[in-house]
């Protein structure tokens, strides 16, 4: 649908003039025009409108300094609150069984048309992911399940400075559209897609039936979500080692785990061991790096078969890649635009291309691949926006808000 009224004179439902894509980079503009049933317009760098096939738009006002997104939803559209989202999909093993199924389908089970996905960031360009804007990371993420005919558009602001103000670090809003227009606008306080992707990628690549151990570098909310995603898998690791810089005010790492992970089932809690030695925590079958390279690890242990870089886009410490990895995958599918640009994770492509000629989407990896490898597999995981779209449809179905 993108490209309607190229003169930029159309008015949205608030009576404001909608401009064209001039605030976006050329590459971003061309990419956005490929998404069906959605038109992305910018009235300024901080005011983005998402227009559905019915002509009704949602205006997003973005304040990077405050880490806030203010959607002007209006009375014509369905709105699902963050309270309803957490009520329907709370942080639990049952929730992640649902989300893991979605992630498997998007990453490995796609039949028919391949999904479209695109991330725009840093004042609406796509050439560099990881830029900051007034101290915050602002993202516009689109994912289309072309087979189901559904698109999710997610606006996301991440501002670490908000923690000093006792405010949420990130805010996220998800808009779901199809050929009829916008189905719902969802306050989206959950961060499930990336950790779920990481869990099912491990499941897909592991040798079937073989025992395995896991190391997690970094312990916070992302690690907590990841543990739930792992707990929802049919097969659990024998041991899980967790290392972090500090104990977050608790006397010991064990006290921290006991206090911050009480909801985890006992069968996975019993497998967790706090580990102060990062080299020991990384000499396992599978390593999840949640610290973005900001740790003392210089070389993973010889035992490592899979190293997953989770949602980090500027990690500086991966000199071990040349000697360590044999195959390199990315979980962000993207798509090639008219310029022929390969749209894998930009940092991964830029930094690793010389060392990783086999870079490809993880869907190309054969099931059980780790049982066939002598050297480790490395995979970056940002999570697909298509997963958000399908989670949004699940929320609409659960709440009964279908028009």
Image (cartoon, helix red, strand yellow):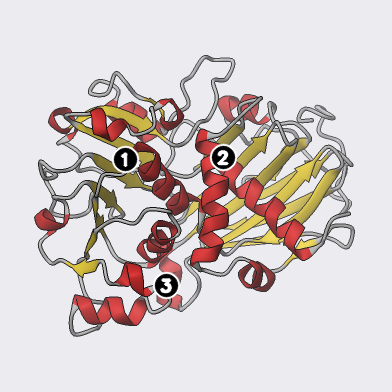
- Where is residue 337? Give x, y as percent: 57, 20
Residue highlighted by disc 2: 105
Badge 2 marks a residue whose secondary structure is helix
**How far apart are the two marked residues, 1 and 2, measured between alpha carbons?**
18 Å
Disc on the earlier residue, 3 or 2: 2
**How far apart are the two marked residues, 3 and 1, measured between alpha carbons?**
37 Å
The tag on residue 215 is none
Tell whether 250 sits left or right of 30: left
Position of the N terminus by quadrant = top right
Mark 3 near mark 2, Cβ–Cβ under 8 Å? Answer: no
- Residue 149 visible, this angle: yes
- Residue 67 visible, this angle: no
Write the residue at 29% across / 76% down.
257
Write the residue at 40% across / 75% down.
164
Write the residue at 19% across / 43% down.
317
Badge 3 marks a residue whose secondary structure is helix
Disc on the earlier residue, 3 or 1: 3
Residue highlighted by disc 1: 206
- Where is residue 365? Give x, y as percent: 38, 28
- Where is residue 122? Give x, y as percent: 49, 43
In the picture as drawn, the residue positioned furthest to the bottom comes out as 251
The tag on residue 163 is 3
Tell whether 384 sits left or right of 259: right
Write the residue at 60% across / 49% down.
388
* Front-lying residue, 304 or 220: 304
């Amino acid at each position: 649908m993108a490209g309607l009224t190229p003169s930029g004179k159309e008015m949205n439902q608030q009576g404001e003039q909608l401009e064209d894509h001039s605030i976006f980079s050329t590459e971003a503009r061309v990419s956005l025009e490929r998404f069906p049933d959605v038109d992305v317009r910018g009235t300024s760098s901080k005011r983005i409108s998402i227009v559905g096939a019915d002509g009704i738009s949602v205006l997003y006002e973005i304040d990077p300094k405050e880490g806030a997104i203010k959607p002007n939803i209006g009375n014509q559209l369905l709105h699902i609150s963050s309270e309803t989202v957490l009520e329907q999909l709370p942080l639990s093993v049952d929730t992640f069984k649902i989300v893991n199924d979605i992630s498997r389908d998007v990453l490995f089970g796609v039949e028919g048309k391949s999904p479209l996905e695109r991330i725009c960031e840093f004042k609406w360009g796509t050439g560099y992911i990881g830029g900051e804007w007034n101290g915050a990371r602002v993202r516009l993420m689109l994912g289309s399940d072309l087979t189901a005919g559904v698109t999710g558009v997610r606006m996301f602001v991440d501002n670490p400075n908000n923690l000093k103000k006792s405010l949420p670090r990130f805010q996220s809003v998800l808009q779901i559209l199809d050929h009829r227009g916008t189905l719902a606008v969802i306050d989206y306080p959950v961060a499930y897609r990336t950790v779920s992707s990481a869990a099912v990628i491990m499941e897909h690549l592991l040798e079937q039936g073989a025992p395995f151990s896991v190391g997690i570098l970094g312990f916070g909310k992302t690690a907590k979500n990841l543990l739930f995603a792992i707990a929802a898998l049919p097969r659990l690791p024998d041991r899980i080692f967790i290392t972090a810089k500090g104990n977050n005010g608790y006397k010991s790492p064990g006290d921290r785990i006991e206090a911050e992970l009480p909801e985890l089932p006992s069968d996975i809690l019993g497998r967790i061991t706090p580990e102060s030695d990062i080299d020991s925590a990384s000499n396992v079958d599978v390593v999840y790096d949640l610290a973005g390279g900001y740790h003392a690890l210089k070389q993973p242990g010889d035992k490592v078969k899979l190293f997953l870089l989770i949602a980090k886009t500027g990690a500086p410490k991966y000199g071990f890649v040349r000697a360590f990895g044999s195959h390199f995958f990315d979980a962000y599918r993207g798509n090639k635009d008219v310029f022929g640009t390969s749209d894998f994770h930009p940092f991964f492509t830029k930094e690793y291309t010389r060392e990783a000629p086999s870079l490809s989407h993880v869907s190309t990896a054969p099931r059980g691949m780790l049982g066939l490898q002598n050297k480790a597999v490395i995979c970056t995981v940002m999570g697909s926006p298509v997963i958000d779209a399908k989670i949004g449809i699940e929320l609409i179905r659960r709440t009964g808000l279908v028009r």
